[in-house]
Image (spheres, helix red, strand yellow):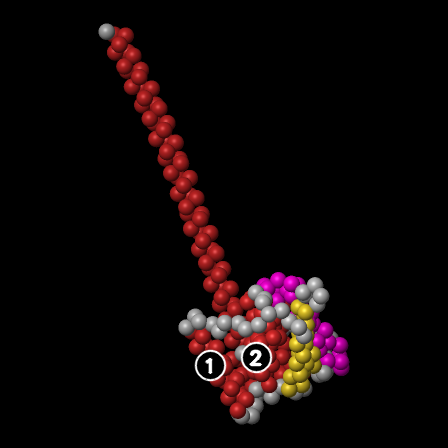
C-alpha cells in the first residue's frame, strides 16, 4: 500500500515537472512569436513610411519642376499669352491629379518629352527637338525620370543660361541604352561650380532612383550639356 502511494506521488511530481516544463516552453514560444510579430509590424511601418517619404519627395520635385517654374516665369514678367495660359492650365490639371491621387497615365518616352518641350516653349524658350527610334514600352518610372530630369534641365536653361534657345535629343543605342541630352549655347558653367538643389534632386537623384545616371558638362563660354542615361 505504501509503495503504491509512493508511486502515485512520484508520478504526480513527474507530471507536475513535465507540465511546468511544457508550460514554460509554451510561454517562451509565445514570447518569441510576440517579439517576431512586433518586429514584422515595425518593419511594415518602416516600409510604409519610406513609401510615403518617397511619394512626398516625388510630388515636391514635380511641383518644383513645373508649377514653381511657371510662377517664377510669371513673376519675372513673362508675356501672358496663349502659350503661358496653356502652361498654367496644364499645371492646374497636374495639381488636380495630385489631389485626387489620379495621376495622368504616362505615354511613351517620346510623347512625354514632347509634352515637356511644349510646356517649356510656353514659357518663351525655343526648344529644338530630335527624337530617334525610341522604344515604345518602358517602365513608367524610367519615362517619368527621363522626362522630369529633362524638364528641370530646361528650367535651368531658362533661369541661368541667358539664352532663349535649347536643343533636346533622345536616342536609343544598339544595346538599348537610352540617352537624352539637353544643350544650350549660354555662358557655360562657372569655375568652381556647385550644383544647386534642382540639379541634385530633380536631375541626379531622380535618374539614380530609376537606375540611370546624369552627367553635367559646361566649359566657360561654351554652353552647357546635361546628359541623361538609362541602361536598358
The tag earlier along the polypeptide, 2 or 1, is: 1
Give the structural element (helix, strand or loop) at label 2: helix
The question of residue 230 being in magenta is answered with yes
Q: Pinpoint residue 222: horizontal percent, then vertical percent.
A: 76, 80
Q: Secondary structure at mark 1?
A: helix
Give the labeled residue for mark 2: 115
**Residue identified by numbered label 1:** 92
Residue 152 visible in this rendered orientation of the protein: no
- The N terminus appears in which quarter of the rendering? top left
Residue at point 37% right, 33% down? 26
Q: Residue at x 63, y 76 (%)?
A: 153
Q: Which residues are magenta?
A: 207-232
User: Label 2, label 1: how many angstroms apart (C-alpha)?
Assistant: 15 Å
Query: For this rendering, which residue is in front, 148 or 133?
Result: 133
Residue 57: image x %, image y %?
A: 52, 68
Question: For residue 15, what is the image quadrant?
Answer: top left
The x and y percentages for residue 159 are: 62, 82
> What residue is drawn where x is 71% and y is 83%?
186
- Using the rendered image of the protein, determine whether residue 36 is visible from the camera's viewpoint: yes
Quadrant housing the C terminus: bottom right
Q: Position of residue 120 (x, y in %)?
A: 59, 83
Taking the magenta stretch, the answer to whether it contains residue 58 is no
Could you say which is closer to the camera, residue 150 or residue 35?
150
User: For this view, does 132 lie left or right of residue 96?
Assistant: right
Q: Nearer the viewer, residue 172 or 182?
A: 172
Q: In the figure, residue 12 lies in which quadrant?
A: top left
Q: Is residue 147 above or below residue 44?
A: below
Name the side, left or right, on which 118 lies relative to 170. left
Q: Is residue 33 above or below residue 61?
A: above
Amino acid at each position: 500500500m505504501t509503495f503504491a502511494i509512493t508511486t502515485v506521488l512520484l508520478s504526480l511530481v513527474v507530471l507536475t515537472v513535465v507540465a511546468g516544463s511544457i508550460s514554460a516552453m509554451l510561454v517562451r514560444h509565445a514570447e518569441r512569436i510576440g517579439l517576431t510579430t512586433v518586429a514584422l509590424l515595425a518593419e511594415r511601418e518602416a516600409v510604409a513610411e519610406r513609401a510615403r517619404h518617397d511619394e512626398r519627395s516625388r510630388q515636391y520635385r514635380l511641383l518644383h519642376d513645373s508649377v514653381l517654374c511657371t510662377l517664377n516665369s510669371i513673376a519675372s514678367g513673362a508675356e501672358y499669352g496663349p502659350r503661358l495660359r496653356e502652361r498654367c492650365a496644364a499645371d492646374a490639371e497636374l495639381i488636380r491629379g495630385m489631389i485626387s491621387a489620379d495621376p495622368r497615365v504616362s505615354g511613351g518616352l517620346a510623347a512625354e518629352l514632347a509634352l515637356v518641350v511644349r510646356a517649356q516653349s510656353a514659357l518663351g524658350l525655343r526648344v529644338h527637338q530630335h527624337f530617334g527610334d525610341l522604344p515604345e514600352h518602358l517602365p513608367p518610372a524610367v519615362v517619368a525620370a527621363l522626362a522630369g530630369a529633362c524638364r528641370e534641365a530646361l528650367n535651368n536653361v531658362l533661369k541661368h543660361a541667358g539664352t532663349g534657345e535649347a536643343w533636346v535629343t533622345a536616342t536609343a543605342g544598339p544595346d538599348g541604352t537610352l540617352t537624352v541630352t539637353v544643350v544650350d549655347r549660354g555662358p557655360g558653367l562657372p569655375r568652381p561650380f556647385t550644383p544647386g538643389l534642382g540639379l541634385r534632386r530633380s536631375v541626379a537623384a531622380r535618374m539614380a532612383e530609376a537606375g540611370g545616371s546624369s552627367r553635367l558638362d559646361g566649359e566657360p563660354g561654351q554652353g552647357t550639356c546635361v546628359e541623361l542615361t538609362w541602361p536598358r
